[in-house]
Image: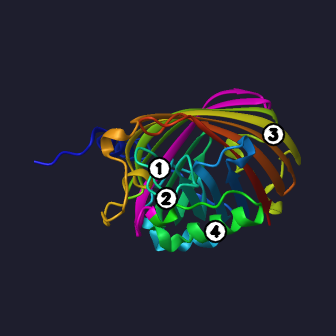
Amino acid sequence: MTTLPSAMRLSLVVFLLLSLLQSRATAQTADSLSPDRLLFYTFANDAFFRTDYYFTQGMTLNLVLPVFGRSPVNKVLLPGPAGSVRHHGVKLFYDGFTPLRIQDDTIRRGDRPYASYIYATLYRVATARHRRLTSGLNLGLIGPAVGAKGFQTKVHALIDAPTPRGWDYQIRNDLVLGYEALLEQRLLGLGKAAELIGQGQASVGTLNTFAGAGLLLRLGKMNPYFQNLGLASRANRTGLQRFQLYATGQAESRVVGYNATMQGGLLNRRSPYTLAAADLKRVVAQGTVSLVAAYGGLSFRTSAVWITPEFRGSRHHSWVQFGLGVAF
């Protein structure tokens, strides 16, 4: 009989626990839909640390609108705590990965494969008091059809950087399909100046399967974390601080079951080069330090991210991310 890898079993157990923790009794307070209309964009690149390998560039575009509450996808998302304020959104991810040396025009055995993906997460955020549950359905594509070869080659030509020569050996086209959930709970608060938040998350799918836990610390002049998603539309800002300036520190650890950017897609097994399951590091830690400035309906975030080795023989890695948010 075929058995599930231990990390995949752990991910399924976490999903079950999240569902049980958030299950609602019969007579509960009704949920409400937030009127917030938000747009967030991030850009990440490792060049700021004078590196050009592993996770090398990425972008996200995140749109939150009340109308997304009508999506049929919501029927398969977790309901969240009773009496929640709900936000609904679509977040688009684009990321690219390369080995240590992009100048080589042959496969670098024992190194990370070239890979890129683009996918959308249709999600719901349900917040009640000091607890929040986020769940989402992922749908997209990994492989040459994403266009990372042309994108990175063009960018490197513009900035006079070395030409990447190994994209012909990248992970082949395959479906990205998955389900993810994140549970957050306030553990400690010091007025409006400090918050400590515990996090538990899990993902099951063709791109990533993992279970993890972490802590988020916020310090500075800020609105409470569970008040909104970082910004609020004008009609929803009553009682909130107009100007915010604060720092955050996040530490998380994951138990990895599957990673298609290194192991190839689950449906298409014809990639020219992949890492064996035994080569993956099953426990990966990541730390993020951010500085956030916001005024009214506009925010700017800059972050430095550090991650432990993801496969046998690899290095620690780090990159910088910039983010812009607008409430309208």
Mark 2 in CB contact with mark 1 (< 8 angstroms): yes
SS class, disc 2: strand
CA gap, disc 4 and disc 1: 31 Å
Task: Write down the residue under mark 4.
Answer: 151
What kind of secondary structure does the magenta stretch mostly adopt?
A: strand
Mark 2 in CB contact with mark 4 (< 8 angstroms): no
Label 3 is placed on what type of residue? Answer: Met
CA gap, disc 2 and disc 3: 27 Å
SS class, disc 4: helix
Instruction: Determine which quarter of the picture holds residue 246.
Output: top right
Q: Residue at x 83, y 58 (%)?
A: 297
Task: Write down the residue under mark 3.
Answer: 222
Task: Write down the residue under mark 1.
Answer: 181
Mark 3 in CB contact with mark 4 (< 8 angstroms): no
Label 2 is placed on what type of residue? Answer: Gly
Left or right of 150 on screen, residue 139: left
Callout in the foreground (4, 1): 4
Q: Residue at x 72, y 60 (%)?
A: 40
CA gap, disc 3 and disc 4: 38 Å
Please say which color scheme the image uses. rainbow
